[in-house]
Image (tube, grey):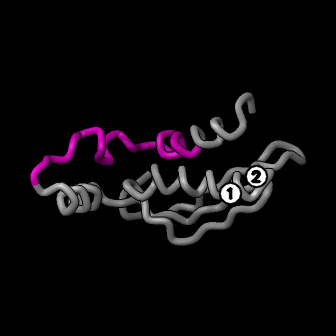
Amino acid sequence: MQPDRSYHLYTHANGFENLFKSNENYRYFLKRYDHFIPSVADTLAWCLMPNHINFLARIKTQAEPRAAYSLKHPEKELPVEETLQGLGTLEEFNSPVRSSFQLLYPGL
């Protein structure tokens, strides 16, 4: 993935299974998404449906997370692991989202 570019990110459940089985599942997913994604991407649009999800996200430049961190913590330097360094593949970007699903649906 390239910084400062937008991507359509999506996933679909297997067969006739649903990703979300209750309203609480939607809330939990969005809470976890909000925990992991805003530091690396701006979400431009999203749609959660029972059996699939869609996001339109713009990957942040490396300077954006640094600037936000510096405003919140002017006395600290941003740790290397908090930057976009190493975020080069869709797999690496999707890892936090997949982790959230695995917590929701172990064994899928």
Residue type beneath disc 1: Tyr
Mark-to-mark CA distance, 1 and 2 = 6 Å
Query: Above or below — where is 43 with respect to 93?
Result: below
Q: Residue 86: where, in percent of width, then height?
A: 34, 39
**Viewer-closest of 26 and 15:** 26
Query: Above or below — where is 60 with respect to 32?
Result: below
Q: Residue 51: where, in percent of width, then height?
A: 79, 54
Residue positioned 20% across, 47% down in the render: 78
Rendering quarter of residue 80? top left
Q: Residue 100: where, in percent of width, then height?
A: 59, 42
Q: Which residues are magenta?
A: 75-97
Verify whether residue 31 appears in magenta. no
Residue positioned 37% across, 64% down in the render: 4
The disc at residue 34 is: none
Q: Residue 41: where, in percent of width, then height?
A: 42, 59
Q: Which residue is mark 2?
A: 20
Rendering quarter of residue 42? bottom left
**Dots 1 and 2: beta carbons under 8 Å?**
yes
> At numbered mark 2, what does the secondary structure look like: helix, strand or loop?
loop
Quarter of the figure that contains the C terminus: top right
Residue positioned 68% across, 40% down in the render: 104
Query: Above or below — where is 107 with respect to 54?
Result: above
**Viewer-closest of 57 and 38:** 38
Does residue 88 appear to the left or right of 45 in the view shown? left
Residue type beneath disc 2: Phe
Few, some or many C-alpha atoms within 10 Å of disc 1 (few <14, some 14-19, many ≥20)?
some
**Viewer-closest of 90 and 101:** 101
Residue positioned 36% across, 60% down in the render: 60
Q: Which residue is mark 1?
A: 26
